[in-house]
Image (tube, rainbow, N blue to C red):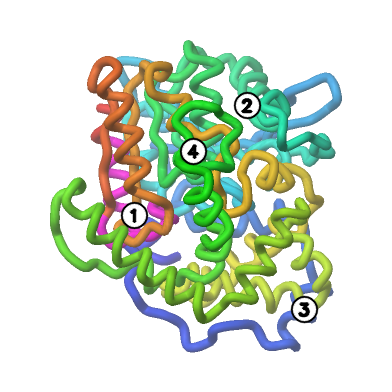
Amino acid sequence: MSQAVRAGSRLKPLYPMVTELSYKESFKQWFERKSLADYEARVLSYLPFFPDSDGVREAKTLDVPVDAKGNKIHELYIENKQKAPEERHLVIVHGFGAALGFFYRNFNGLSLIPGVKIHALDLLGYGLSSRPKFPSLDVTKEEDIHKAEDFFVDSMEAWRKERNIDRFVLVGHSLGGYLSSCYSLKYKDAVEKLILVSPVGIERSEMSLTEINRPPAVQAQDIARKSSPNIEEELLQSQEQSQQHHQNVSDSASIASTESRNNDERMQQARTRPQLRKFLVKMWENHCSVFSIVRAAAPFGPKLVSLWTFSRFGAIEDPQELMDIHRYSYNTFVAKGSGEYSLTVLLAPGAWARLPLLDRLPGNITIPTLWLYGENDWMSKKAGRQCVSEINSQGEKSAKFRIIDGAGHHVYLDNPTDFNQSVRKFVGW
């Protein structure tokens, strides 16, 4: 087992020579596929307390019923058996297309908190949770956007009640951050503190259905049409690029420099990959899931996904560990489509929120919040800083902002040590 996993340390930039699967290996993986549960178990087995306890911590997977239709939320439950002065529940929610196993490098460090109970969830429609048909909705109607949010939010609340949890600290990454915000607004009494990790859906734009604070129409349409959808950045940013550390400056001072640098890089990428950008925007406009391409690729699918996994997880030293996370990712992506179809409902092309959080959180969110971004994050740190400022200007100064050095959009993965420390400091456990 890799020591990096045990220690929860920052990944070392030792990138494998192989950058993608061979056709032979791709066909072999496709024909010899096992269940997603098997691949999840392989990834979780890198933890020193799964499936067997280390004497202090115990972990198990659960399938928690959330409605009368038989739908279930899949959960990794980790409990630290040491005594604590109060109940300590930490709920972790993944981003678009991902699953709970993507946080496997964080579970060890976070579970060292005495008495903590970690609940890592597969959102409804993702991972090993039930994958019901996602409803057909009208993206021009605000009430339908709320219905899309409630597909996830209400199932999370049903999970909380079934698990008999009073209050918890909620951590959400990317789309999971957006949905965690929606949950916190709707079920205010359930969330003690909120940690948003590079959340999507913050900025205001012409694509918003909200009438207040819209920017000039021409300017916003120009941005929406010319900006690459964020999924392009997710596909193309390697872990090597994510982990680059440029300078050691304060969070506020580094925003302008990193945003400028990242914007320059994106503009260069846009000029060199116009067809990819147009293709992704066209898929978005037609409400097509990027994972439908992977499913249609059949035996070529593992090779296609390896272009992303071998780059995104390229700092993993152990070849077997890298292959295990690759197989887990591939089999997560090709499972029955469900929750993934929410993306084009909640977000317009360019990943602009139809109901931006800048119009919803300030003045309405009263619990302490922590906003974490990676130094090389392609999500807008400027928008996050603005939301923090507006929240603090309308009430108690309970929102905090931090940039994690040497990390990209997957902050928790690129620099797990600093991520875990930031979470522990904020929750105060």
Please report the residue visible at 59 percent of the width from the left and 20 percent of the height from the top: 160
Asked whether residue 71 is drawn in magenta, I would say: no
Residue designated by label 2: 153
Residue designated by label 4: 177
Asked whether residue 411 is drawn in magenta, I would say: yes
User: How far apart, in angstroms, are the residues tagged by discs 2 and 3?
Assistant: 35 Å
Instruction: Determine if residue 9 is in view.
Output: no
Question: Which badge, 2 or 3, comes first in the chain's sequence?
Answer: 2
Residue designated by label 3: 300
Nearer to me, 15 or 219 = 219
Nearer to me, 231 or 374 = 231
Labels 3 & 4 near each other (Cβ < 8 A): no
Stretch of the chain drawn in magenta? 405-424
Disc 2 residue type (three-letter): Val
Residue 401 lies, in percent from the top left, at 27, 39
Image vertical order of residue 291 relative to residue 22, above or below: above
Image vertical order of residue 7 relative to residue 81, above or below: below
Disc 1 residue type (three-letter): Gly
Where does the N terminus fall, quadrant-wise? bottom left
Please indicate whether residue 287 sits to the left or right of residue 213 in the image: right
Mark in front: 3 vs 1:
1
Instruction: Determine if residue 57 is in view.
Output: yes
Residue 3 lies, in percent from the top left, at 36, 64
Disc 3 residue type (three-letter): Phe
Q: Secondary structure at mark 1?
A: strand
Disc 4 residue type (three-letter): Gly
Residue 2 lies, in percent from the top left, at 41, 66
Residue designated by label 1: 374
User: How far apart, in angstroms, are the residues tagged by discs 4 and 2?
Assistant: 12 Å
User: How far apart, in angstroms, are the residues tagged by discs 3 and 4?
Assistant: 32 Å
